[in-house]
Amino acid sequence: MNDSFMSGRLAGFLVLVSAVSLLGLLLLFAYAPYLRSDDSNDTDVASRSAVGFAGLRELLSLSGIPSEIDRGPLVRGNSRPSLVILTPADTTSAADVTAYEYSAPTLIVLPKWTTATLLEKPQWVSKSGMLNNPQVARLVAGVARGATLANKTGSARNVETMLGPAAPPGLAPIVLKHIEELRSIGGTRTVLTARDNGPILGMVRHQGQPIYILSEPDLMNNQGLADADTARAALAVIAQLRRGEGPVRFDVTLNGLGRDPGLLHAVFEPPLLGATVCALLAALLIGLHAASRFGSPQRAGRVFARGKTVLAVNTAELLRIMGREGAMAVRYVHAARELVLMRLGARRHAAPEQDELLAILERQNGLDIRYGALAAEAGEAQSGAALLRIAQRAYFWRRGITRGY
């Protein structure tokens, strides 16, 4: 009955599979944000739904205005943006909006509609109502204290706007072709105000930067940009809010699409990638060394071993300690001669007859080893190495005389 649980080869295979699986799992954890799909139907620049802003980025690109997507400070480019656009959703935390790093002029486009995903087209949404104004106002409460929102029911067409005291130089009044449930903002310095409806674009200063808040997202979302006049109006507003020639930066971290790498991701990227590879190779070498050095565990033996083998080993060790190994050569050669004579049945003959018989057999078998030379060499042996050499020659001489028997 085999007492081993599994073979060494199977155990090594299982260890290899486990190591590869663990490495793959670590890679998935490290690159999970990068493997996540950018498909979205929310209020972000990756969304092609009615409330998304993918069309705005495309409009800027066609107009020659550079743009970029901000996925987090650790993967952010070194360029200084001329304008940052934040498009928080109703699920975005107000604390995240307040804690955002405002290092350039920023436009916050507030959400307006509640939507439902279309089952047949997951990237599209259907409008199901309006968001609660106090809920939306809380998103910017930490940036624009006292900001309030209000709605005018019904559909407004050809709404003229006027410039407010905070309007940047060069900004011209625009006309809103068609706005449903037009929403205005109060408690901020007015940039643009809709005639008979109130401000739709306000401005505050936060962390030393101008922060513009657009209460009416239909001016810039995909639904609004479907109208050519609205698209031209949105482009004109963005062009005047920019400062410098840097790109317009669309933030998606507030929408949950950030990709800030953690420590686990860093160990698989330069400059730490080299150290990681060295550590993996070192672990592989340690495993190979352990497998070749130790192998299968030995069974526990007796405390005091018994048998002929132990007796022979102990006798050999005693001879080695006493330095008498060389003296055993003569006796070993003589024992080989006795074994040959016993095999030939010649032990009953006299010594001269035995020597003559061995000489005849040596010549007949073509042996280059002679017993006389072997005995003379044994008499001069002084070390264990000499004993081993003579024992090997005596073995070959014996097999040659007896032809392998």
Image (cartoon, rainbow, N blue to C red):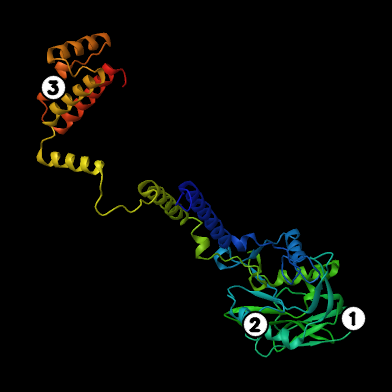
Numbered label tally:
3
Image quadrant of residue 189? bottom right
Q: Earlier in the sequence, mark 3 or mark 1?
A: 1
280 or 172, which is in the foreground? 280
Amino acid type indicated by mark 3: Glu
Residue matched to label 1: 155
In this rendering, the label closer to the viewer, 2 or 3 = 3
Badge 2: residue crowd in 10 Å (few <14, some 14–19, many ≥20): many
Q: Split into 4 quadrants, where in the image is the C terminus?
A: top left
* Left or right: where 67 falls relative to 402: right
Q: Residue at x 74, y 83 (%)?
A: 164
Residue 94's tag is 2
Location of residue 183 in the rendering, given as x and y in whole percent from the top left corner: 80, 83
Q: Secondary structure at mark 2?
A: helix
Badge 1: residue crowd in 10 Å (few <14, some 14–19, many ≥20): few
Location of residue 340 in the rendering, given as x and y in whole percent from the top left corner: 23, 20
Is residue 93 placed above or below 12 in the rendered structure? below
Location of residue 299 in the rendering, given as x and y in whole percent from the top left corner: 35, 52
Amino acid type indicated by mark 1: Ser
In this rendering, the label closer to the viewer, 1 or 2 = 2
C-alpha span from label 1 to label 2: 30 Å
Location of residue 51 in the rendering, given as x and y in whole percent from the top left corner: 78, 72
Q: Secondary structure at mark 1?
A: strand
Q: Earlier in the sequence, mark 2 or mark 3?
A: 2
C-alpha span from label 2 to label 3: 100 Å
Is residue 281 placed above or below 262 in the rendered structure? above
Q: Earlier in the sequence, mark 1 or mark 2?
A: 2
Residue matched to label 3: 377
The answer to the question of whether label 3 and label 1 lie on touching residues, with beta carbons closer than 8 A, is: no
